[in-house]
Image (cartoon, grey):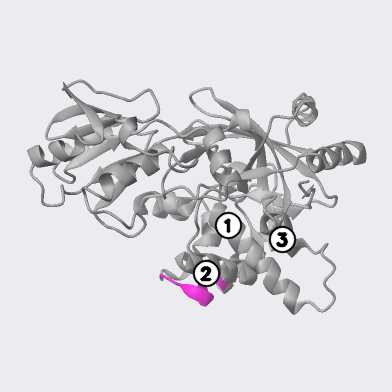
């Protein structure tokens, strides 16, 4: 059963939330980042980019300490306030395409992650886990929730719907034309209903935020060892999460781009593909696959459809049936010589929110020799992988919603 609890969020005042909220700083171009830092003194980017104040690039432990200082300054200046009562936070996003997502921001248990009640479907990189764990330990807060998903539940859905009939604490629209809303739930009866309902859910799944989850678990173990009065109720035993029902999850594919054909001619490459795929030249037609185990390929100015010859491929488990794994085992590794998907510089990725024109353009420009288009992975496939204790190849899913940093902050 999942332990999902309310917490006292630190958050911006209502009049400044739209100025504070930011995307993950890695998603900004250098020009965008500088513009926001130059002209918006309230942006959360000032906290995570503390060297801006000194016009200097700062890294490591020194940066972590300055992040903590900037954060404390935002609290001292009353840009941030902390709620006095533990609360759940209903968060709703309506994006510019009209898609709506509603969920609950809460604290999830690190022990549940350790005990596989919170399940993962992606591998993490150990050194990144430890770097982020050290960062969290120094700064003492988390400003970007892990995205968790759970089976649709009528009790939680009705509770979320009812609270949205009231006026939102926050309502703001971003430059991307996404509108964000936040409501507080802190009355005892409703809090108890939500908490007890989550206890009836046996498993929740990480949709996005595997490294943050792993780092939070590491931090919990570290602080538990250092605290001789450890009780299990300390805030470091939990990490901030955004929990949404499976039906609200939006999953896009990650397409593949390869820089060369591994020394093969176009004709030799196609002949090798023919062993595992039925190939059809689609010419200039912008072919996008619609079914599992079907792929599009753009090569030398033409699109191709690739249909897996299933009699030549063995489906031993949930991972073997995953299209990203099929592409890896039948083309990327044996033909194109790419065995290390995490570190090989010959492969790049383009998520499905960028259409196939992106792949065509990059290949036509000569940056890549070939591109592959896939269909999105489903929630059921993610769950099957997680339940079997398996992990997907890197860049198998691009998942929304993407929350803004600095709207709710969890201290430990």
Q: Residues within 10 Å of mark 2 (few under 14, many from 20)?
A: few
Q: Secondary structure at mark 2?
A: helix
Q: Secondary structure at mark 3?
A: strand
Inspect the magenta stretch and tell me whether residue 63 lies in it: yes
Residue at (58, 71) in percent of width and height:
134
Which stretch is magenta?
Answer: 57-64
Residue at (74, 42) in percent of width and height:
202
Residue 277 placement (x, y as % from top left): 25, 32
Q: Is residue 134 above or below residue 341?
A: below
| Secondary structure that dominates the magenta span | helix
Residue 180 placement (x, y as % from top left): 61, 34
| Res. 73 in view | no
Residue at (57, 46) in percent of width and height:
388
Q: CA distance from mark 1 to mark 2?
A: 11 Å
Q: Are marks 3 and 1 in contact (CB under 8 Å)?
A: no
Q: CA distance from mark 3 to mark 1?
A: 15 Å
Q: Secondary structure at mark 1?
A: helix
Nearest to the observer: residue 146 or residue 124: 124
Residue at (54, 57) in percent of width and height:
211
| Res. 224 in view | yes
Name the residue tied to disc 3. 411
Name the residue tied to disc 1. 212
Q: Is residue 270 above or below residue 222?
A: above
The circle drawn on residue 131 is 2
Task: Tell which circle, 3 or 2, labels the residue nearer the N-terminal end.
Answer: 2
Task: Tell which circle, 3 or 1, labels the residue nearer the N-terminal end.
Answer: 1
Residue 68 placement (x, y as % from top left): 61, 68
Q: Quadrant of the C terminus?
A: bottom right
Q: Residues within 10 Å of mark 1 (few under 14, many from 20)?
A: many
For the residues carrying marks 3 and 2, which lies nearer the camera in this image?
2
Side of 195 where 117 appears, left or right: left
């Amino acid at each position: 059963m999942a332990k999902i609890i309310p917490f006292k969020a630190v958050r911006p005042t209502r009049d400044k939330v739209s100025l504070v909220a930011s995307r993950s700083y890695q998603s900004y171009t250098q020009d965008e980042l500088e513009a926001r830092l130059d002209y918006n003194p309230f942006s959360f980017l000032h906290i995570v980019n503390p060297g801006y104040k000194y016009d200097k690039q700062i890294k490591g432990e020194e940066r972590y300490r300055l992040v903590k200082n900037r954060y404390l300054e935002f609290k001292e200046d009353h840009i941030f306030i902390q709620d006095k009562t533990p609360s759940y936070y209903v968060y709703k996003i309506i994006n510019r395409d009209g898609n709506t997502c509603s969920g609950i921001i809460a604290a999830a248990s690190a022990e549940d992650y350790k005990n596989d009640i919170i399940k993962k479907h992606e591998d993490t990189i150990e050194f990144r886990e430890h770097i982020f764990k050290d960062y969290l330990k120094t700064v003492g807060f988390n400003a970007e929730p892990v995205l968790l998903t759970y089976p649709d539940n009528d009790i939680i859905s009705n509770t979320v719907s009812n609270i949205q009939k009231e006026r939102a604490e926050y309502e703001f629209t971003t430059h991307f034309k996404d509108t964000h809303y936040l409501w507080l739930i802190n009355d005892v009866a409703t809090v108890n209903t939500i908490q007890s309902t989550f206890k009836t859910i046996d498993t929740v799944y990480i949709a996005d935020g595997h490294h943050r989850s792993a780092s939070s678990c590491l931090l919990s173990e570290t602080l538990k060892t250092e605290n001789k009065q450890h009780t299990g109720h300390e805030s470091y035993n939990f990490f901030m999460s955004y929990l949404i029902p499976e039906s609200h999850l939006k999953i896009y594919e990650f397409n593949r781009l390869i820089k060369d054909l591994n020394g093969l001619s176009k004709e030799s490459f196609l002949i090798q593909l023919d062993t595992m795929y039925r190939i059809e030249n689609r010419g200039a037609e912008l072919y996008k696959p619609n079914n599992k185990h079907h792929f599009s390929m753009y090569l030398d100015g033409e699109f191709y459809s690739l249909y897996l010859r299933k009699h030549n491929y063995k489906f031993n488990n949930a991972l073997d049936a995953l299209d990203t794994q099929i592409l890896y085992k039948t083309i990327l590794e044996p033909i194109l010589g790419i065995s290390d998907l995490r570190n090989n510089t010959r492969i790049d990725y383009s998520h499905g929110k960028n259409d196939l024109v992106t792949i065509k353009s990059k290949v036509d420009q000569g940056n890549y020799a070939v591109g592959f288009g896939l269909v999105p992975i489903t929630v059921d496939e993610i769950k099957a992988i997680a339940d079997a204790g398996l992990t997907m190849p890197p860049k198998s899913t691009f998942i929304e919603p993407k929350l803004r940093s600095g709207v709710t902050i969890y201290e430990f």
